[in-house]
Image (cartoon, rainbow, N blue to C red):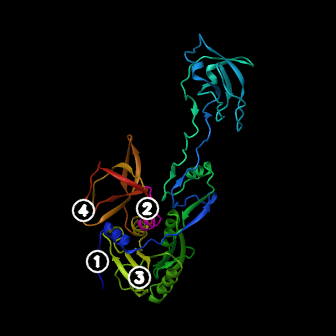
Amino acid sequence: MELFHVVSVEEAKKIINESFNDIAQTEKVGIAQCLGRVISKDIVSYCNVPGFRRSAVDGYAVKSSDVAGANESIPSILTLKGEVLMGKEPPGTVYYSECYYVPTGGMLPEGTDCVIMIEYTDKLDDETVLCNSPAAPGENVVEADEDIKQGEVLIQAGSRLRPYEVGVLSSIGCTEVEVYKKTRIGVISTGDEVVDPEVSPKLGQVRDINTYLLHSLIKESGAEPFVYGVAGDEFSDLAERVNRAYQECDIVLISGGSSVGKKDQTLKVLKSLPQSKILVHGIAVKPGKPTIIAKSGEKIIFGLPGHPLACAVVYKVIVRHYLENLIKRCEQDYPVACKFSVNYHKAKGREEYLPVVLNWEDCDITASPVFGKAGLITGFSKAWGYLKIERNVEGLKAGEKVFVYKF
């Protein structure tokens, strides 16, 4: 029987980084279709936004020198020249002791450098406004390039586009953007005991969890999943599905059969692929030790553990690392700082990813472990997120500060 040759998580990532060339491709999409996509080039503004000086309030555009020292006892008397309409250029220029009414967002007339809020004014008649407050140059004014400057890098390459970035693209007239193509990922589950979710399982059988778990994780990552069904524990069945997925996809994920038992066929199938090389068989991580990373040609194939929690952890820690390197994703995931709730022991030598729930207690966020065996789906369905315990740490103490990442 072949045994694991265990490597650390960081060693596994390094092996992946050194073993594969950049296969990412790009395409152009319209901004109505770019939500959630990762851009491949910096977005640089070719214009100023808003592009003209505008008012931040409803009020009167004036020269600051005309209202210096104004107060309720001695107001400044201004001649009202007219009104600036939204979306229109001002009808004239402001000279000494003159003003124009400007709505919020309206363009400022030439000759003005500030706006007096309407609350600090009194309108005597159609041509006279009393100003009861001074204003400094630039007060209540949005400058032409205050929001976005021409030549400014607005969105860095490797950023995943949120609704807010899509709005920014629209503001500079960018209607098409270059993004990385979605990585095609084939998903195969294994095991004679695994049946489709719509089937009522017999004693000894379980419904297929990992196909749908991985399908959702892949979609969440911005990639495109392709399902190749459940393979039995026969070499030929698994080999046929793996070969088909290998031909049609960029990456293949096989859940189950990656251990060293008599019926575990994943390793044998991977060795049978053209130009195949087993890069890793066994990672010092809990849960998820029986993980395989293989190379065939220029494609990567992952043999993931069959236990759902272990499968999810290895996807989050290893598979997603490879996906994000492909698209050169530049964002960071920021954890929540918490206090750990209990004393918790772990064995040295393996990184552990522990599912936790969060609770608000006395103005502190407390993280409590979700206890359960590795095969239980509720290990992460109940959890808010997970924390990492380093491989050479023996455990955590109650009250210790920890960092929790969202599942």
Q: Residue furthest bottom?
A: 236
Q: Is residue 268 magenta?
A: no
Q: Which numbered dot is residue 392?
A: 4
Give the spatial CA distance, label 2 vs label 1.
28 Å
Q: Amino acid at mark 4?
A: Asn
Q: Which numbered dot is residue 266?
A: 3
Q: Residue furthest top?
A: 73
In the image, residue 269 above or below residue 363: below
Give the spatial CA distance, label 2 vs label 4.
24 Å
Residue 142, quarter of picture? top right
- The answer to whether the residues at label 1 and label 3 have Cβ atoms under 8 Å apart is no
The tag earlier along the polypeptide, 4 or 1, is 1
In this view, the residue in front, 85 or 211, is 85
Few, some or many residues within 10 Å of mark 3 (<14, 14–19, 20+): many
- The answer to whether the residues at label 2 and label 1 have Cβ atoms under 8 Å apart is no
Give the spatial CA distance, label 3 vs label 4.
30 Å
- The location of residue 240, given as percent across then percent down, is 50, 86
What's the magenta region? Answer: 321-331
Secondary structure under the numbered disc 2 in the rendered image: helix
Secondary structure under the numbered disc 1 in the rendered image: loop
On the image, numbered disc 2 is attached to which residue?
380
In the image, residue 267 above or below residue 389: below
Q: Amino acid at mark 2?
A: Phe
Q: Residue furthest right?
A: 126
The tag earlier along the polypeptide, 2 or 1, is 1
Give the spatial CA distance, label 1 vs label 3.
16 Å
The tag earlier along the polypeptide, 1 or 3, is 1
In the image, residue 321 above or below residue 170: below
Pick the quarter of the image with the C terminus. bottom left
